[in-house]
Amino acid sequence: RVLDLALPSCSEKTIAVPIFLLCAATDLFSFRFPGARWQMCLVALAFGAVNGVSSGKVSAVTCMMTGHLQKLGNDLADFALKGSKLSKNFNPLLNLGIFLSFSAGLASAAYA
C-alpha cells in the first residue's frame, strides 16, 4: 500500500524484483543454515507482498495459494533431485489439485 501511495504510476512489475530477491535469499539461507527456520520470515514477507499486490491491483485474493504453490515447487524439486528416495509425505497431486481448482474458479469468475 505504501508503494501505491508513494508511486501511483508504478506497475505491479516493480515489486517482482524485491519478491524474487526475498525468495532467493530464503533459498540461500536455507541452504547455508539447513536447520534454521528464521529465514522463513523473508518468504512470508514476499508472499505478503504478492497477496497485497494481487488483492489491490487485480482484486484476486491469493493468500490461500502461495503456500500451496511453494509446496508444489518443493515437491517437484524433491522429485527431480531425490527420485525414488521420496518421503511418504510426498503428495504433489493434492497441491496441484488445489491450484487447478483455484485457477478454474478464477477463470470462471473472470469470464462471468
Image (cartoon, rainbow, N blue to C red):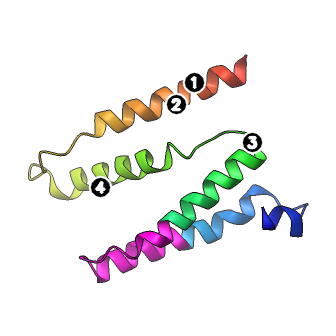
Q: Say whether disc 2 or disc 4 marks the residue closer to the N-terminus.
A: 4
In the rendered image, which residue does mark 1 sit on? 105
Task: Name the kind of residue labelled 1 in the image.
Answer: Gly
Q: CA distance from mark 1 to mark 4?
A: 27 Å
> Which comes before the other along the chain, label 4 or label 3?
3
What is the CA distance from the residue labelled 2 to the residue labelled 1? 5 Å
Give amino acid for label 2: Phe
Q: Position of residue 63 (x, y in %)?
A: 55, 47
- Identify the residue at horizontal 78%, vertical 61% (top origin): 1
Q: Nearer the viewer, residue 37 or 79?
A: 37
Q: Which mark is residue 68?
A: none
Please give the label number shown on residue 102. 2
Q: Amino acid at mark 3?
A: Val
| Label 3–label 2 contact, CB within 8 A | no
> Quadrant location of residue 40?
bottom left
Query: How dense is the environment of label 2, judged by Cα within 10 Å: few (below 14), some, or many (20 and up)?
Result: some
23 to 66, vertically: above or below: below
Label 3 to label 2, Cα distance in Å? 15 Å
CB within 8 Å, label 2 to label 1: yes
Q: Which residues are magenta?
A: 22-43
Under circle 1, the secondary element is helix
For label 3, the SS is loop
Residue to which mark 3 is pinned: 58
Q: Earlier in the sequence, mark 3 or mark 2?
A: 3
Q: Main secondary structure of the magenta part?
A: helix
